[in-house]
Image (tube, helix red, strand yellow):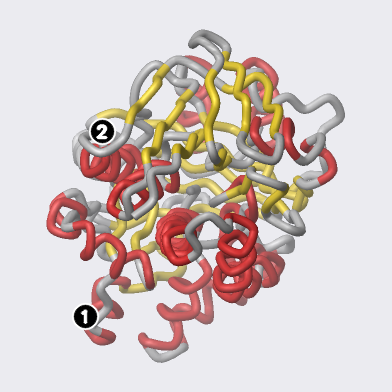
Amino acid sequence: MSNQTVLISGAGIAGPTLAYWLARHGFRPTVVERATALRSSGSPVDVRGPAVDVAEQMGVMPRIRDAATDVTGMRFVNAAGRRVGRVNLRALQQAAGSREVELPRGDLASILSQASRDHAEFLFHDAIVALRQDEHGVSVTFDRAQPRRFDLVIGADGLHSAVRRLAFGPESDFAHHMGLYVATMRLGGLDGQDGLVEGGREVIMYNTPGRAVAIHPSRGDALAFFAFRRPAAPGFDYRDPAQHKRLLTAAFQGGGWRVPELLKRVQAADDLYFDSVSQVRVRPWWHGRVALLGDAASCVSLFGDGSSLAMAGAFTLAQELAASPGDHRLAFRRYEASHRTLVDPKQRNIARAASLLIPATRPGILARNLATRLWPLGAAAGWLRRRLAPVS
């Protein structure tokens, strides 16, 4: 059993999962999070594949299932709101015996944090501002807390990772814009009497060439989703809400269906999420005593399995550290070699997934819609479900 101290930056999905498993192996984890509390974003994410096994071993799978969105299908509509395609996701899951669960991201983060909070130290409303490592450990300077020493530091702090910037180099060296921007916005506890909600438990999506707008009926807190094709915006700042609203409004101005109503809500929103659809490519995922996890290491972006991969990666990293006591270099190498077998195929599928969700042309939209009507249920739904994963 190890008694090493490990600082984990980020209390999203990967960070708390890693803290839980490190503590189980005798490490002493500390999680630092810039936010003042757990994030409450309602953006839906999936727990599937190896992440289900991780959650079951943590004993949290019943809570994850209780928090499920219970989405039954995806409906594609035209500007008048008429259905032009549909995929029955519930039937696919039942036919395949799938164990996957979709739930709000905030709920998943809360469940994972609660599982680890008795086994790890959590520092909210703080951030790492400097790292200095030597042969024996890492000296960490925080924004608020007093400087401390740790044996290892893990960056699980997402696409815009501070740990990656401090230990590996500027974000521009590793994050690559994929020609898309995405936004999500909570719509509140809407019901069938609200003009925006018309699909019950179905995701409703409206496309124009290079644009997609959807309403996702997450549990009691519907979510608006926007995605559009665009080269990298000059001077883009992921922390500038005013800029985000301008870009979003310009991209969707004049759209049909419910777009005008949704754009009005965008202007009034104080919780709009907006960012570039990007991939992170880092080789290797570790430098000395500092390693990266989740999106900080290998963001698979909008069309991947970010949350599931984060949970699986955290489990693997903890296992390898426990299996190589005193040899973090060997552990980091084994973790990366193993986890890349899951991550790399997802990163290669971005273009194909984008062509499905956000066809660039009107013929592409028509072909996608026709496919959902003509293909056998399992083929059409499987094709969509494997490639459509909400923001992670």
Q: Residue furthest bottom?
A: 376
Estimate how packed mark 2 is, as few (under 14), some (14 to 19) or many (20 or more) residues with alpha carbons within 10 Å: few
Residue 260 marker: none
Position of 212 with respect to 285 (left or right) is: left
- The answer to which of 95 and 57 lies nearer the viewer is 57
SS for dot 2 = loop
Mark 1, secondary structure of its residue: helix
Left or right of 49 on screen, residue 229: right
Looking at the image, residue 382 sits to the left or right of residue 200; the answer is right
Q: Is residue 138 left or right of residue 18?
A: right
Is the N terminus in the top left, top right, bottom left or bottom right quadrant? bottom left
For residue 216, say whether it is visible: no
Classify 121 as above or below 206: above
Is 333 or 308 nearer to us in this picture? 333
- Could you give the CA–CA distance between mark 1 and mark 2, rounded to whole angstroms? 30 Å
Which residue occupies 19% across, 35% down? Answer: 193
Q: Nearer the viewer, mark 1 or mark 2?
A: 1
Residue found at x 73% / y 63%: 361
Write down the quadrant of residue 356 in the picture.
Answer: bottom right
| Residue at horizontal 58 percent and vertical 40 percent from the top | 155
Q: From the viewer's perspective, is residue 231 above or below residue 21?
A: above
N-term-proximal mark, 1 vs 2: 1
Q: Amino acid at mark 2?
A: Asp
Q: Which residue is mark 2?
A: 194
| Amino acid type at image mark 1 | Gln
- The spot of residue 229 in percent (x, y) is 73, 49
Residue 38 in the image: state x and y as whole percent: 34, 27
Q: Residue at x 26, y 60 (%)?
A: 55
Q: Label 1: which residue?
A: 94
Residue 124 place in picture, x, y as percent:
40, 19
Give x and y (percent) for residue 45.
39, 52
Instruction: Return the residue nearer the eye: 206 or 281.
Output: 281
